[in-house]
Image: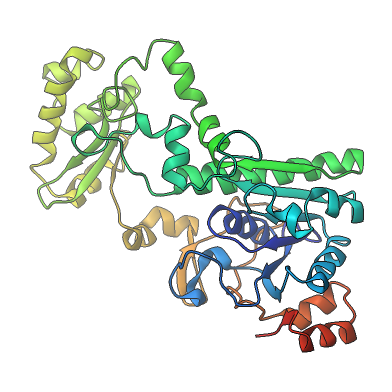
């Protein structure tokens, strides 16, 4: 059950943002069928496949899409699907015979979701890339300060998942809503470079408004502001400070017993930010991370301990919210967002490639005798 109960999704197996989008749809109750290659390979290894959180919540059929018979099965499945997700380079699905035109000829109501790094057109559309290169081209990494002033290397949340998978989910859901009006499906072109760029909307506005004037590492949200950055504590741990607004900055000054110093009344004197940063670093270095967190997290100083993943699971707020769930032996993020009438279920384990081939093909209306013959021919594989 869930908010997408009754929605049928075909996921042509890939890596990264495509599986993330499929996971999100499955978390919300969609019946997601992952189409794996017969050999079971999915590209980049993510470790123990039985612990693959991105693979949770759906069933798998192993199908040889390079054979005419395997393609025919996929197109038959398309007839009863609401959504198809694929993450090939532009033109590959068309060459294999299940591009948008092929699929819409069988089901004009299908929402066809395409996940790429560079998009379906443009001079780099067919080139290889990864999260870091997409973010760099989109003008994102240039504004993330790393060691020695070099651009930071963020983990692949901003590109693959925020700018890619989440953008694909938003597009698919929007297309499903529009289909309810028009009765017709359409193609959703979700590109990581597009999603990375649109997440920069506020920064573009800040630059145009004159409040993002400095090079990387010298602005309000990129580590330049002494009241919006992390500080090392006496035990080697870190606290994050985000006291932007005056009232929160005042609470920070009170919590650090700095109300009587110049730093308390000159928050926005940019010329003194290096001096204020040094002063805050000096203060935070006098106590441990957890001592500061115990005193400041309950206030409006906007200070939080920088937690490792294992520690985040144990944080009282996260536990009270049910931020994590235990499923198939893995402590993992719970489905989100939350719905008042149609809550998402606890995730089910990731499927091995082809684990549900005969079962799921029958459920999706493929004749069992035909499936048996396809198995004998090596087109359908059952794990």
**Residue at left offset 92%, top offset 43%:** 183
- Which residue is located at x 53 percent, y 56 percent? 16
Quadrant hosting residue 243: top left
Residue 151 picture location, percent across and down? 30, 35
Q: Quadrant of residue 11?
A: bottom right
Q: Which quadrant of the rendered structure holds the C terminus?
A: bottom right
**Placement of 195 over or under 233, stated as above or below:** above
Q: Which residue is found at the position 84% from the left and 61% from the top?
A: 78
Spot occupied by residue 68 in the image (x, y as percentages of width and height): 82, 70
Q: Camera-side residue: 366 or 284?
A: 366
- Confirm whether residue 3 shows in the render: no
17 and 31: which is toward the camera: 17
Q: Is residue 223 above or below residue 268?
A: below
Residue 371: x and y in percent read 83, 83
Residue at left offset 20%, top offset 52%: 290
In the visual, does 256 lie left or right of 216?
Answer: left
Identify the image's colour scheme: rainbow, by chain, secondary structure or one colour.
rainbow
How many discs mark residues in the rendered view?
0
Q: Is residue 277 left or right of residue 221?
A: left
Between residues 190 and 253, which one lies in front from this camera angle? 190
Q: Relative to 322, does residue 225 appear above or below in the rendering?
A: above
Asked if one can make out residue 17 in the rendered structure from this viewpoint, the answer is: yes
Provide residue 306's location: percent of width, then percent of height. 28, 48
- The answer to whether residue 289 is left or right of residue 322 is left
Residue 80 placement, left or right of 208: right
Name the image quarter holding the N terminus. Answer: bottom right
Vertical relation: 25 (above or below) 72: above
């Amino acid at each position: 059950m869930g908010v997408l109960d009754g929605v049928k999704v075909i996921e042509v197996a890939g890596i990264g943002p495509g599986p993330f989008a499929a996971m999100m749809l499955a978390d919300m109750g969609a019946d997601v069928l992952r189409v794996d290659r017969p050999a079971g390979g999915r590209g980049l290894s993510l470790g123990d496949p039985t612990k693959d959180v991105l693979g949770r919540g759906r069933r798998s059929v192993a199908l040889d899409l390079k054979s005419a018979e395997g393609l025919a099965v996929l197109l038959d499945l398309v007839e009863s699907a609401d959504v198809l997700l694929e993450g090939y380079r532009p033109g590959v699905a068309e060459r294999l015979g299940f591009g948008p035109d092929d699929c819409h000829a069988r089901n004009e109501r299908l929402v066809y979701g395409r996940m790429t790094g560079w998009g379906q057109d443009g001079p780099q559309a067919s080139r290889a890339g990864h999260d870091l290169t997409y973010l760099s081209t989109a003008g994102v990494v240039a504004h993330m300060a790393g060691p020695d002033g070099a651009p930071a290397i963020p983990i692949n949340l901003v590109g693959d998942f925020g700018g890619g998978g989440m953008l694909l989910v938003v597009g698919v859901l929007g297309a499903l809503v529009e289909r309810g009006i028009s009765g017709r499906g359409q193609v959703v072109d979700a590109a990581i470079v597009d999603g990375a760029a649109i997440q920069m909307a506020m920064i573009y506005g800040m630059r145009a408004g004159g409040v993002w004037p400095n090079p990387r590492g010298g602005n309000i949200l990129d580590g330049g502001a002494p009241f919006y950055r992390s500080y090392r504590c006496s035990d080697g741990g870190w606290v994050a400070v985000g006291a932007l607004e005056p009232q929160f900055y005042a609470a920070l000054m009170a919590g650090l017993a700095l109300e009587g110093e110049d730093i308390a009344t000159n928050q926005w004197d940019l010329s003194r930010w290096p001096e204020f940063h040094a002063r805050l670093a000096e203060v935070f270095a006098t106590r441990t991370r957890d001592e500061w967190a115990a005193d400041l997290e309950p206030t409006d100083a906007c200070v939080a301990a920088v937690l490792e993943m294992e520690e985040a699971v144990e944080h009282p707020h996260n536990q009270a919210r049910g931020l994590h769930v235990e499923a198939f032996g893995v402590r993992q993020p719970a489905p989100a967002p939350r719905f008042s009438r149609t809550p998402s279920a606890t995730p089910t384990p990731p499927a091995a490639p082809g684990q549900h081939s005969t079962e799921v093909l029958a459920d999706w209306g493929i004749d069992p005798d035909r499936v048996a013959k396809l198995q004998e021919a090596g087109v359908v594989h059952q794990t």
